[in-house]
């Protein structure tokens, strides 16, 4: 019985050199293939489009990207801040603590607080929130102090200081001269609420 089965199997197989006839797909099979390929292509394009727009890419020097600040442009300690309207931030060097980069938008309703040299503080023109030189809340309807941006300072001795997650100032003393300052406006550090 086993020999009869193997003989039939050999007879069903084409001999070497014989051509094998393959039927062309029917119209229905062809349409299934076309529809399947079209849907796969559409899903691939949709996925690529979503990834393209969901992952932001900001150029250096525009809001959301990194700003490079020459060390010579740092303001003096305890004096008026250096403002960058394109980056929406203020660079401040406090007398005791060090370098702070403040997000120049009020935490109340998003107005732009201005530096008032007469009062030596930031004041929001919309609803009157007031902030100290380092962005700490003084009074007004704002719920917290001004937010800060992640900043990286590289010193001459090779050390690098980065703004911590709590937004503490970067001390500028004891490392030598500053080589570079990079301000990442895409990494905002929210300050805790007022007490």
Image: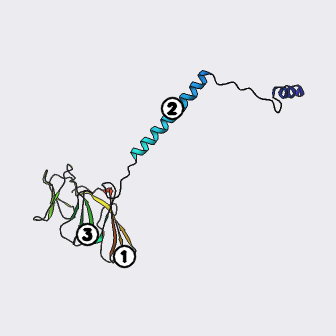
Residue ranking furthest to the top: 27
Q: Which residue is mark 2?
A: 39
Q: Quadrant of residue 49?
A: top left
Q: Is residue 101 left or right of residue 21?
A: left
Report the front residue among 144 and 44: 44
Residue 20, compared with residue 156, is above or below; it is above
**Quadrant of image for the N terminus:** top right
Q: Where in the figure is residue 57, as x and y percent of width and height?
A: 38, 51
Q: Secondary structure at mark 2?
A: helix
Circle number at residue 73? 3
Badge 3 element: helix
* Residue neighbourhood size for the residue with mark 1, other residues' Cα within 10 Å, grouped as few (<14), some (14–19), many (≥20): few
* Earlier residue among tags 2 and 3: 2
| The label number, if any, that marks residue 156 in the structure image | 1
Up-down relation of residue 174 to residue 122 (above or below): below
Find residue 118 and report its horizontal and vertical position in percent.
10, 65
| Mark 3 vs 1, N-terminal side | 3
Is 24 on the left or on the right of 190, as rendered?
Answer: right
> How crowded is the residue under tag 3: few (<14 C-alpha within 10 Å), some, or many (20+)?
few
Q: Residue at x 53, y 28 (%)?
A: 35
Looking at the image, residue 103 sits to the left or right of residue 138; the answer is right
Q: Are marks 2 and 3 in contact (CB under 8 Å)?
A: no
Label number found at residue 105: none
């Amino acid at each position: 019985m086993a020999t009869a089965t193997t003989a039939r199997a050999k007879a069903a197989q084409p001999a070497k050199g014989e051509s094998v006839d393959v039927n062309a797909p029917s119209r229905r099979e062809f349409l299934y293939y076309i529809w399947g390929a079209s849907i796969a292509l559409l899903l691939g394009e949709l996925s690529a489009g979503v990834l393209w727009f969901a992952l932001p890419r900001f150029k250096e020097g525009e809001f959301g990207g990194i700003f490079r600040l020459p060390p010579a442009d740092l303001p003096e300690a305890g004096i008026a801040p250096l403002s960058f309207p394109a980056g929406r931030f203020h660079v401040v060097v406090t007398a005791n603590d060090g370098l702070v980069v403040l997000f120049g938008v009020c935490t109340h309703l998003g107005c732009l607080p201005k530096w008032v040299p007469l009062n030596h503080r930031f004041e929001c023109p919309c609803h009157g929130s007031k902030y100290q030189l380092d962005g700490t809340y003084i009074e007004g309807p704002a719920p917290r102090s001004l937010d800060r941006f992640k900043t990286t300072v590289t010193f001459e001795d090779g050390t690098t200081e980065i703004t911590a997650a709590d937004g503490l100032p970067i001390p500028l003393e004891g490392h030598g001269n500053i080589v570079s300052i990079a301000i990442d406006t895409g990494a905002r550090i929210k300050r805790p609420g007022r007490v």
